[in-house]
Amino acid sequence: MDGGGRILRSLRESLATSLPPVHFSLAQPEAAVAGASYASATLPPQPPHRSDDEPPALQRYAFLARPGVGLVAVLLLFGGVGLAGALQNGGYDALIRREGQPWDIAARAFGFDISAVTITGQSRLTENELLGAAGVTPRQSLLFLDAGAVRERLLAIPLVKTARVMKLYPNRLVVAIEERRPQALWQRDGRILVVSDDGVAIDELRDERYLGLPFVVGEGAQKRLPEFLAIREGMGDLAQRVKAGVLVANRRWDIEMTNGVIVKLPEADPGRAIGALIRLQREARILDKDVMAIDLRAADRVTVRLTEEAAAAREAALPHKTKKAGG
């Protein structure tokens, strides 16, 4: 027994000297799992992480383990699913009609909306008419608005002669236009149009606002409007008795007076013929006679055509020659 006891004591002593003591607490792993702070646990030091030991594929996709990446991926997934469903069910088109294009929605969110529109130069056109024709709506953003396209759409309005469009960031649009001025009425194919001084048809005659404008008739008459206006102005007081100017064969003018008399002017130098008409009216009151037409195309003579009643009366007033009877 003494020998056996000695042997057991020697074994315990040898084990105690060869193995170092290890001390740990069972409470430390429990605190980490429960979400407690690791500062209260005294874990043994861990060896440093070495990326060199990882395979290249794991190193390439290591960013996926960063905080927030999973949330973004989930949001993109659900966003893609929602967009696909909206496209399939027509919800995307409804969104575009209601809120505008996606890039415009984003730009408006950053403050580049169109919150102020300044329009100058209009007198006959309203702001709503101009904005409607220009295609400018609250669904657009100033950042992605095509100012050149807006200008072209404004110039397509017949009453607009010139237009300028300026974008003042972040959210103001400035439009400056010059309107055409109605100068005359032009009859063509049974329609009466309002035309400007440059011959552009502005609108169809719809009310009595423009009835006092000069009146021209004939193909191409609107393009030669300045020529007719100069003739009319040269007639002085007789201009008030002018009903219309009729362009004949796109070459010369006939002037129709309010009492129905037609004054035929030459192709070259119509001013000379107007001077002769003024003289005849002053000396003989020719426009107050029973005449149908006054032809001033020849430089050396004036030809007058009487009305049927006046011609019959003149024929009756002429002495009739009687033929002598033979013996």
Image (tube, rainbow, N blue to C red):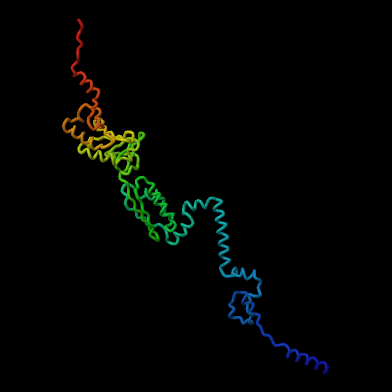
Q: Residue furthest bottom?
A: 2
* Image quadrant in which you'd find residue 146: bottom left
- Which residue lies at the image location 68% right of the left edge and 85% below the top edge? 22
Q: Where does residue 288 sit, x and y in percent of width and height?
A: 20, 29
Does residue 67 appear in this view? yes
Q: Where does residue 99 sit, x and y in percent of width and height?
A: 46, 54
* Image quadrant in which you'd find residue 315: top left
Q: Where does residue 52 sit, x and y in percent of width and height?
A: 64, 75
Q: Residue furthest top?
A: 327
User: Observer-nearest residue: 62 or 89?
Assistant: 62
Q: Looking at the image, is 23 positioned above or below residue 158?
A: below
User: Observer-nearest residue: 72 or 248?
Assistant: 248
Quadrant the N terminus occupies: bottom right
Q: Where does residue 290 sit, x and y in percent of width and height?
A: 21, 26
Does residue 209 appear in this view? no
Q: Looking at the image, is 161 positioned above or below residue 232?
A: below
In the image, 147: left or right of 2? Answer: left
Q: Total label count?
A: 0
In the image, 300: left or right of 29? Answer: left
In the image, 200: left or right of 83? Answer: left
Q: Looking at the image, is 327 positioned above or below residue 61?
A: above
User: Observer-nearest residue: 149 or 73?
Assistant: 149
Quadrant the C terminus occupies: top left
User: Observer-nearest residue: 188 or 327?
Assistant: 327
